[in-house]
Image (tube, rainbow, N blue to C red):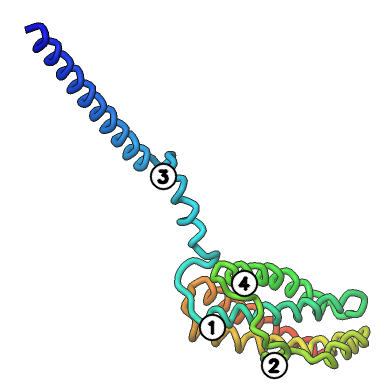
Amino acid sequence: MRTFRRRTTRTLGLSGAVAAAALLLAACGDDGAMKGMDHDGPAASATAPAASSAAPSASGAFNDADVMFAQMMIPHHEQALEMAKLADGRAEDAGIRTIVAAVEKAQDPEIQKMKSWLKGWGEPESAGMGHSMAGMMTEQDMKKLADAKGKGFDRTFAELMIAHHEGAVEMAKDEQKDGANAEAKALAGEVVRAQTAEIAELRKILDRL
């Protein structure tokens, strides 16, 4: 009887230990699941960066036309800024100086915006188009502008910037027609609006020079 009692007691003790271990493992599993549901827990922290990094700077869908618009408009804007810088110490007409200020104010922020889009889309900044884009000045054009002063500069600047803006408007209208990204199309609309108005003003300046 004593031997039987000892074995029974030992068996009950082992059964209790197994049950306790099972309960402990279940509790740990529930705790892990709760942590996975908690937005501040390790599981949420591990997945959150991947979700945020997947969103491009320009939200929504985009297509090849959007990419080409940004890749072409960046160097186009950069050349307009180069032309505007040449006005310092050369431009005489107040209207030309006003246009120069407008170009500098609008186009540098637009360049930065388009660069951020391309980065978010995983596309290169350059399409390798160079001077073949509509309205782009040649090296001779830029030299002619740099060599001019006073009214000669004002007239040359107006003539070249009209052609330059017309090229930008043409590219922007293509984006409005063929693009898919809402933000890119909105910027294209702003380019059409602003630069069409500046073309009209530059023509008025030419008439009085």
The residue depicted at 32 percent of the width and 32 percent of the height is: 28
Task: Assess whether mark 3 and mark 1 are in contact (beta carbons under 8 angstroms).
Answer: no
As measured in the structure, the alpha-carbon distance from the residue carrying label 2 to the one carrying label 1 is 18 Å
Please count the marks in the image: 4
Name the residue rendered at 14%, 11% in the picture.
Answer: 6
- Amino acid bearing label 4: Met
Name the mark nearer the viewer: 3 or 4: 3
From the viewer's side, name the closer residue of 165 and 141. Answer: 141
Q: Is mark 4 on a helix, strand or loop?
A: helix
Is the residue 208 above or below the residue 115 in the image?
below
Marks 3 & 2, CB-CB < 8 Å contact: no
The residue shown at (70%, 90%) is 135
Marks 2 and 4 in Cβ contact (< 8 Å): no
Secondary structure under the numbered disc 3 in the rendered image: helix
Q: How far apart are marks 3 and 2 (CA)?
A: 52 Å
Q: Which of marks 2 and 4 is nearer the N terminus?
A: 4
- Please, what is the three-letter code of the amino acid marked with disc 3? Ala
Question: Where in the figure is residue 156, as x and y percent of width and height?
Answer: 84, 90
Amino acid type assigned to the residue bearing label 1 in the image: Glu
What residue would you read off at disc 2?
Answer: 132
Viewer-side residue, 208 vs 149: 149
Q: Residue at x 60, y 78 (%)?
A: 70
Q: Earlier in the sequence, mark 1 or mark 4?
A: 4
Residue 43 tag number: 3
Expressed as whole percent of the image width and height from the top left, the position of residue 44 reads 42, 45
Q: N-terminal of the two: label 3 or label 2?
A: 3
Q: In this view, does 94 lie to the left or right of 112?
A: right
Q: Which amino acid does label 2 sit on?
A: Ser
Question: Which label sits on residue 114?
Answer: 4
Q: Marks 3 and 4, how far apart in space?
A: 35 Å
